[in-house]
């Protein structure tokens, strides 16, 4: 018990150290922080998360370029009447970030257009909290009574690739799903941004139908290494089961907001090389 208490004190201190506005400028979360309209925050955050692998400077650079192509008004771009004009997408043909190319980008832009414009949804949150049905040319979303992060991520994957068949199969690799045992690091990070609202000015907390207590800790190689070193994770694979195991351990220290410890674990691994 004393050991757990001491570990909690150590990690709480690191959370306080890194869960600060000064953290923002060097992190991909700086991308959605450029906006004030919720839909702009959602869209910019979505791409910052999806492109969120590799060096942080490279991620931020790619996101800034993408948003520039959308005139730094992503929601207006998606909803514009001229969206369907092919000439508007010629500049996007040169976009690439690592293995993410223009073909992948066009599908995700098309999905966002479908969700906000065709479906008439005011927030991207419903893409995670509802089940999508497309029958007889009628599309609709039905809210789920039992919302868990696992079924939310599975439902989101099914929605992104279920409303149309017009995409390259390779594009699926950019949206992870627990159904394939993925740790879903980038999507869990995105949910952290959108859901947590602790008043510290880093995460946005603009979604209301998922609680911070439900979130799963974003698990990458840095977080996993630190978690194993300090005894919070035993599983050797960095998969969905490992992310859930780590989060269960974090809930013992804060059941209402376990994912706040992402600030501590990530920065211990990346900044401090713990």
Image: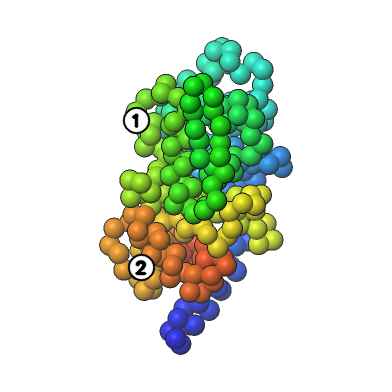
The image shows residue 51 at horizontal and vertical percentages of 47, 39
Against 230, is 168 above or below?
above
- Between 36 and 34, the residue placed more toward the observer is 36
| Disc assigned to residue 32 | none
| Whether residue 138 is visible | yes
Q: Is residue 102 above or below residue 145?
A: above
Which residue position holds label 2?
A: 233
Evaluate whether residue 25 shows in this view.
no
Q: Quadrant of residue 192?
A: bottom right
Q: Which mark is residue 170?
A: 1
Of residues 184 and 130, which is closer to you in this image?
130
Please report the residue visible at 33 percent of the width from the left and 45 percent of the height from the top.
Answer: 180
Crowd band around label 2 with a 10 angstrom C-alpha radius: few (<14), some (14–19), many (20+): many
Taking 225 as reference, is 203 above or below it?
A: above
Helix, strand, or loop for circle 2? Answer: loop
Query: In the rendered view of the protein, which quadrant contains the N terminus?
Result: bottom left
- Residue 274 as seen in the image, left or right of residue 130: left
**Residue in front for this viewpoint, 54 or 248:** 248
Pick out the residue farthest to the right. 36
Name which residue lies at 65% across and 46% down. Answer: 33
**Residue at the spot x=34%, y=28% of the render?**
169
Q: Position of residue 65 (x, y in %)?
A: 55, 31
């Amino acid at each position: 018990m004393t050991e757990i208490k001491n570990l909690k004190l150590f990690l709480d201190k690191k959370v306080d150290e890194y869960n600060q506005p000064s953290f923002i400028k060097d992190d991909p979360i700086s991308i959605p922080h450029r906006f004030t309209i919720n839909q702009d925050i959602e869209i910019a955050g979505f791409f910052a998360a999806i492109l969120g692998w590799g060096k942080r400077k490279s991620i931020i650079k790619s996101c800034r370029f993408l948003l520039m192509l959308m005139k730094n008004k992503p929601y207006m771009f998606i909803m514009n009447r001229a969206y369907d004009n092919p000439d508007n997408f010629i500049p996007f043909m040169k976009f690439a970030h690592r293995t993410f190319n223009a073909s992948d980008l066009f599908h995700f832009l098309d999905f966002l257009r479908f969700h906000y414009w065709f479906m008439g949804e005011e927030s991207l949150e419903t893409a995670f909290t509802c089940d999508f049905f497309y029958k007889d040319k009628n599309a609709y979303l039905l809210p789920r009574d039992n919302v868990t992060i696992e079924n939310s991520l599975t439902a989101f994957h099914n929605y992104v690739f279920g409303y149309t068949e017009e995409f390259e199969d390779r594009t699926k690799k950019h949206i992870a799903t627990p159904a394939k045992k993925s740790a879903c690091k980038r999507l869990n990070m995105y949910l952290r941004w959108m859901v947590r609202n602790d008043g510290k000015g880093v995460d946005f907390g603009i979604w209301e139908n998922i609680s911070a207590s439900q979130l799963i800790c974003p698990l990458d190689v840095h977080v996993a290494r630190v978690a194993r070193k300090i005894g919070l994770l035993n599983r050797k694979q960095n998969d969905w089961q490992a992310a859930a195991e780590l989060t269960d351990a974090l809930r013992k220290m804060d059941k209402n907001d376990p994912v706040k410890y992402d600030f501590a674990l990530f920065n211990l691994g990346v900044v401090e090389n713990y």
